[in-house]
Each structure stands twice: as structure tokens, then as C-alpha cells.
Image: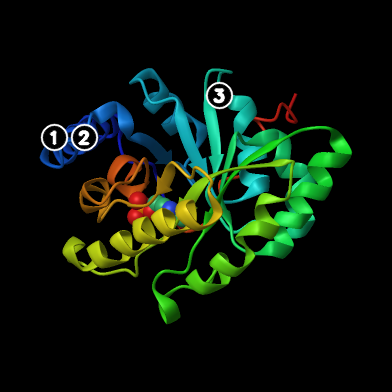
Amino acid sequence: MQPANMASLVENLRRVRENLAAAAAKSGRRPEEIELVAVSKTHPPEALREALEAGQTLFGESRVQEAKAKQPFLPNRARWHFIGHLQSNKVRAALPLFELFHGIDSLAIAREVQRIAQSVGVFSSVLLEVNVAGEGTKFGFKPEELRAQIEDLLALDRLQIGGLMAMAPFHPDPEHARPFFARLRALRDRLQQEAGVGLPQLSMGMSGDYGVAVEEGATLVRVGSAIFGARSGKAWRPERAEMGLDD
Ligand SMILES: *Cc1c(COP(=O)(O)O)cnc(C)c1O
């Protein structure tokens, strides 16, 4: 499937930014408090470059190999967040590619990030994914589990835990997502109090519900299809020609 045509991509980006500013204003927040992660998974580097030229420097990818293949086609000023479920056998490859990992969803994967980060001498910025919907989503800490494990997580000194991340269950009405976002913020407030730690970041809101997420306190919104158009479902892979193998 072709990427959304370029004129509409720039237009989409402009509209998303306008909507973010409007949602911020509505809830008495400054637009600078909210960072837009343009979720570029499955889309080719040309689409990302177009977004970059329109001022969008931060991209979200959910597969390590796909991001690794794509990054060389973008200039260095592009910044990358990992928004997917991180598998333990991908941690070593992923660490140098991303400045923030949104989807740290278990103590086991957090410990693996700690182990690898320690072994290569780096620190890793992460968000803890919470399963705020119960049955609806597969990944993430259950709220009570996170409260029980927060001290163990905070003890991992190679992890810089900036806050929490969640996905609301899919629903055509964005208002349906509001209680889930409110729940994430309340859990964050409670963890801050109980553990005496700052967790300023809330990564919540996607194409269908980012406005509501901002009203409920999101500091990072992960918006894909509203910017890049529909996804094919398949990871992007470089063509032989693009890799210089046809010479
Ligand atoms: C794909 C994805 C998004 C973006 O979804 P859209 O509905 O296209 O905006 C956001 N967050 C996560 C975790 C994703 O996997």
C-alpha cells in the first residue's frame, strides 16, 4: 500500500498539531507540555522525511528491526521512541536505537534492560506500561502489580523511569477512552505519593482519542494513522536498490 500522499501528510500533521493545541487550551495547559510522537511503523522513510521537513522530528516505531532498517534513511536530527512490546532477545539491538522506551510492561523485561544497559555502560529512559483496561489489552502491569513492584523497578539504577504509558481499548467514541486515561493519571499520582518519586510523563492517546488524552494530562501522544494515513499492516523493509545491493 502507498503512503498517504505527501500533500495530505503535511496537512494531516498541521491538523493534529492544531487539535493538540486546542485540547491543551481547553484544559488550561500549555501546548509545549505535550510532545507529539509521530507513529511511523510500516511507513517508508520517504513519508518520515516529508514529516521531518514539516517540522516533525520525533517518530515512534514498534518493531526493532524495522526501525533499525529505516533510521539510516533519515537525517540525524530525527529522534526515535520505541512504543511497542519489547522482547528480551531484542533489548541489546534496541538500546542504541531509541531515546525512550514506552512499553516496559513487566519486571522481567525491566531487569533485562537493566542487565544489558549495565553491560554496555548506558542508561535507558523508559515508561512503564499499565494495563488500565483489564481484559482489553494483552500487555502491561496490572495497577496493583505495579504498586507492589514499584520499589523493585526503582532499584534498577540503569533505568530512568519517566512515567507511565497506556492504551485505551479501541472504541469509535473518544469519550469512551477518558476513564482509562483518568485511571492512568490517578495511578501515577498515587505511585508518586507512595514511592516518593517523580513520574512526570504520561504517554496516552492515539489517532482516535489524543484530544481526550491531552485533557486528561497526557504529556506524550502517539499518533500514527491521523498523520500518515492507513497502515498496510506489514513492516517496512528496504528494497535491494535502496540498500545499494543492485550496483
Ligand atoms: C500503532 C500504535 C499507535 C498509533 O496508532 P494510531 O491509531 O494509528 O494513531 C500508538 N500507540 C501504539 C502503542 C501503537 O502500537
**Residue labelled with disc 2:** 29
Q: Earlier in the sequence, mark 3 or mark 1?
A: 1
Q: Position of residue 120 (x, y in %)?
A: 85, 35
Closer to us: mark 3 or mark 2? 2
Q: Position of residue 74 (x, y in %)?
A: 55, 24
Res. 140 in view: no
Closer to us: mark 3 or mark 1? 1
Vertical position of residue 146 compared to residue 52: above or below: below
**Residue labelled with disc 1:** 25
| Residue pictured at 59% horizontal, 62% vertical | 105
Q: Is residue 17 left or right of residue 66?
A: left
Q: Pointer 3 and pointer 2: residues touching (CB < 8 Å)? A: no
Q: CA distance from mark 3 to mark 2?
A: 32 Å
Q: Amino acid at mark 1?
A: Ala
- Name of the residue lying farthest toward the bottom: 135
Q: Position of residue 220 (x, y in %)?
A: 39, 41
Q: Position of residue 66 (x, y in %)?
A: 62, 45
Q: Amino acid at mark 3?
A: Leu
> Is the residue marked by circle 1 packed among few (<14), some (14-19), or many (20+) residues within 10 Å?
some
> Is the residue marked by circle 3 packed among few (<14), some (14-19), or many (20+) residues within 10 Å?
some
Query: What colouring style does the render use?
Result: rainbow
Q: Is residue 169 left or right of residue 124?
A: left
| Residue pictured at 74% horizontal, 41% vertical | 158
Q: CA distance from mark 3 to mark 1?
A: 33 Å
| Residue pictured at 73% horizontal, 49% vertical | 156
**Residue labelled with disc 3:** 74
Task: State whether label 3 is within 8 Å of ligand 1.
Answer: no
Q: Earlier in the sequence, mark 3 or mark 2?
A: 2
Q: Amino acid at mark 2?
A: Arg
